[in-house]
Amino acid sequence: MKLRRKVYMVAGYNTISMGTGRSEFHPQKPRPSLEEYIKEAGEQVLEQIGGAAHVDECVISNFIAARYNKQANLAAFFPYIDKGLTHKPCVRVEGACATGGLGLATGIKSILAETADVVLVVGVEVQNSVKAVYGADILAAAGWYKERKAGHAHFFPGKFSDRAGAYFEAYGREKTRKAMARWYRNAIENARLCPTAQEFENKTDDLEKLALTEPNPRTFVDHFNVYDCSKVSDGASAIAIVSEEGLKRCGIDKKDAIEVAGLGQAEYDLTLPPENPLRLATTQAAFKKAMAMAGITKQQLSTVECHDCFTIAAVLAVEALGFAGPGEGPDFILKGHTARDGKTPFNTTGGLIGWGHPTGATGVHQAVTIWEQLTQKAGNAQISISSEKPYALSVNMGGDDKTLVAVVYKKT
Amino acid sequence: MKYEEKLENVAVLGAAGKMGSGILYLTATEMVRQKFNPANKNRQFVLYAMDTSHEALSKLMAYIKQQAIKYAEKNILTLREIYRQREDLIDNEQIIIEYADELLRIIRPVIRIESAFDSKIVFEAISENPELKVELMSKINDNNKNKPWFFTNTSAIPISWLDQHARLNGRIMGVHFYNPPAVQKLLEVVKTENTRPELSYFVTDYIKSIGKMFVPSYDVAGFIGNGYFMRDILYAEQLINELQNDEFSYPETVYMVNKVSQDFLIRPMGIFQLVDYVGIDVVQFIMSVMQPHVEKENIQSELIDIHLNNAVKGGQFADGTQKDGFFRYEKGKIEAIFDPGKKRYISVSEVSEKCDEYLGPLPEGWSPWKKLVHRPDKDELLKKYFSQLLASNSPGTVMAKSYLQRFKEIGSDLVKNKVAFKFDDVNAVLIYGFHHAYGPVNDYF
């Protein structure tokens, strides 16, 4: 499939990713609510595109506010962002942690369908409303509920810990653990360059040593320590998806926009275990579709935002995206190829582990990060984008490799 | 009788109090643990929470529920395993609620002493009133055909005195929890010459099962913990008197002795802050209870009496915040010092500059208790610090040295006077009960 119309992304915005690690965060003190995050992110995009009058449609990406915040019907928050959005068509989408990616896909499709020239996409999740032990129940809804009973108390860490265990068994534990620790270090060092990142203020000296803390199965899962996991986050990200006409309407110069070059979506049966725990097959399927649509090779990618909900997910993603062969992901990472000064910098503002993982917002956050990088707006986190590599990729995963959205972007 | 059989019917006297509530909670967790054992499937466990006020018991139940939930949240991995066969319990939240309900279903809040007439074990945690303890225990004992075992939480009264006056015939033992029992690791246990050995076996198993540790003490008033603490207070008072002779004002002396005992000695809190934490009235009560049993020593503090005469009592509010005592606190920090002469609090800022200058700087190598206590190289750091302190002769270090000397003497005397069995036990009480970074018997000074 090819894109039949030019689609752009503009005017990205991220709130702070709030949670442990941020000095503003205190579990017992009041914090911004769901609607405040939505409003902040939405308003900031509207300001950049000349106001709500320019918007044709809105998409809100949220995984599970109905349980975290006892709130549903989120599309009706758009007029709360700005009265000018009253009576505009709005929709809420959900696909677990790939919810943000589905928001992007929905916006892109509205542009392609020519029902809209400007779509406002807001991703949001507020998860610190409950303790982590209860959050684990809520997040488990990203898996098949009938597996919950047999699952680990920390359901998803348990799932990916099992993948890590299988990977250790197949390819060796020591090197893989070292690569996971390196991934953590890269994530935190990148986050330190981004003021909205949850780990922006992280001051740990020896990050790899910390990340190599031995897992304790008596208190957590078999093969992870807490540094192998993304944190619990509150936050919102927003971006506008526009057509050529939309760009003109909003008065945005093309150099401040990025073009959508490819979109790949893939799904796998929620009731089935992965065919092979050593592979992210659905991730690979979505990636291949997006790359085929863009008609490019991975050598043309200047940066990648991958879904590192756990360090092992990053190792597996590096392999699924073809940067390394099976079992060679750890070498690729340890050689520094994913670092910000490496061959292909991954997750340049920290990814899920460093920047944060407000689930419904994550896919949108990935797009905002890439928009910042390709338009030279990434501040201290800016990497060099060479003219030979004008493309970038985001891969957003829901559940245990179940719902996948990959997007290829191009510098204009 | 088997351990779990003894646990079938237990009463906690004074259950709504600070110590009683903790003992009740820990015992309830132990009963639930026993219930989880398939061998006890058909066994009923009943725990009477006995106190005098319905209102206090109502608050107690709320506290127990909160504690049970916290416990279940923390132990969710184990509980998921335990409830593996319960198909109706799927989410962590369902399991946590079920555990808390299961624990609460064991407890019966009551105000009538008759409820304990069927109990096999009675934990006594009422106020340190010897006559009242005797009255309640003898009443239960006289009316209970099970010949119950009594475990008293007294931290001051000799167990043999209670045994004799309540006519318990050796069915009593001291099981002294530290405050708050749900958190503190340490217990002091006290056998008399008459205590029946089966009580001791039970207590050993019980303490192990609730995840605590214990130190044995001889049956001497105050035992190890208060034996040390009361004498430490009296020494602090002696230092205050000496400083007042040097023409320091009373609030200045309190500030300095507290500072030396906390900072120079690297303790979790200064001596007068600790008195406030325990309660000035509680300290006076313990001293008065101990005094008749310690004939050769004067266990009485004029300083404590003066504060109580001014209705300054310390202790804590139900939410755990500190009441005014020797000090007034703002967000847990000392901000003013009570001056009995002026009958009002004097701001710390009015005295601190002069006092800090007089005491002089902290010796090189100092670090606050909080930073030092969990460090793996703590011993080495303390050795270095104390060698610097010993070499210094500033007024602060001189006072600290004399304080340390007295600390060591108190520790040694507790063994010499057959309160503690050995030095290690004294150190264990100070380290695990009082959370000191070091015990009185050491190689540092």
Image (tube, coloured by chain):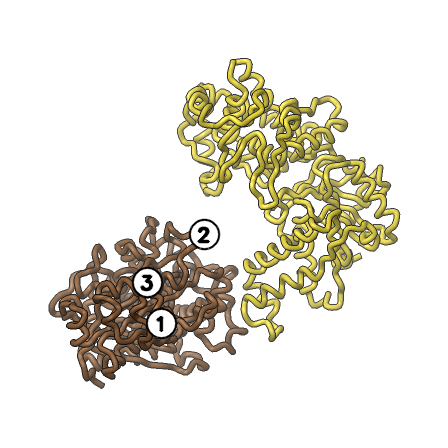
Chain colours: A brown, B yellow
Rendered location of residue B317, percent (x, y) = 60, 42
Left or right: A295, with A398 as reference point: left
Of A373 and B369, the residue lying toward us: A373
Q: Which residue is mark 1?
A: A61
Q: Can residue A102 be seen?
A: no
Q: Which quadrant is the C terminus of chain A positioned in? A: bottom left
Q: Secondary structure at mark 1?
A: strand
Q: Which mark is residue A179?
A: 3
- Please state which of the two labelled residues, at mark 3 or mark 2, is closer to the viewer: 2
Within 10 angstroms of label 3, few (less than 14), some, or many (20 or more) residues?
many
Of A203 and A89, the residue lying toward us: A89
**Residue shown at the point (81%, 43%) measured from the top left:** B136
Distance from Cα at disc 3 to Cα at disc 2: 37 Å
Rendered location of residue B86, percent (x, y) = 62, 73
Of B117 and B202, the residue lying toward us: B117
Q: Is residue A362 above or below residue B291?
A: below
Q: Earlier in the sequence, mark 3 or mark 2?
A: 2
- Please state which of the two labelled residues, at mark 3 or mark 1, is closer to the viewer: 1
Distance from Cα at disc 2 to Cα at disc 1: 26 Å
Q: Count the marks: how many?
A: 3
Q: Is residue A258 above or below residue B198?
A: below
What's the amino acid at mark 3?
Ala
What's the amino acid at mark 1?
Ser
Left or right: B314, with B14 as reference point: left
Distance from Cα at disc 3 to Cα at disc 1: 32 Å
Q: Secondary structure at mark 2?
A: loop
Rendered location of residue A119, percent (x, y) = 26, 74
Within 10 angstroms of label 1, few (less than 14), some, or many (20 or more) residues?
many
Q: Are marks 3 and 1 on the same chain?
A: yes
Chain of the residue where label 3 is placed in the rendered structure: A
Chain of the residue where label 1 is placed in the rendered structure: A
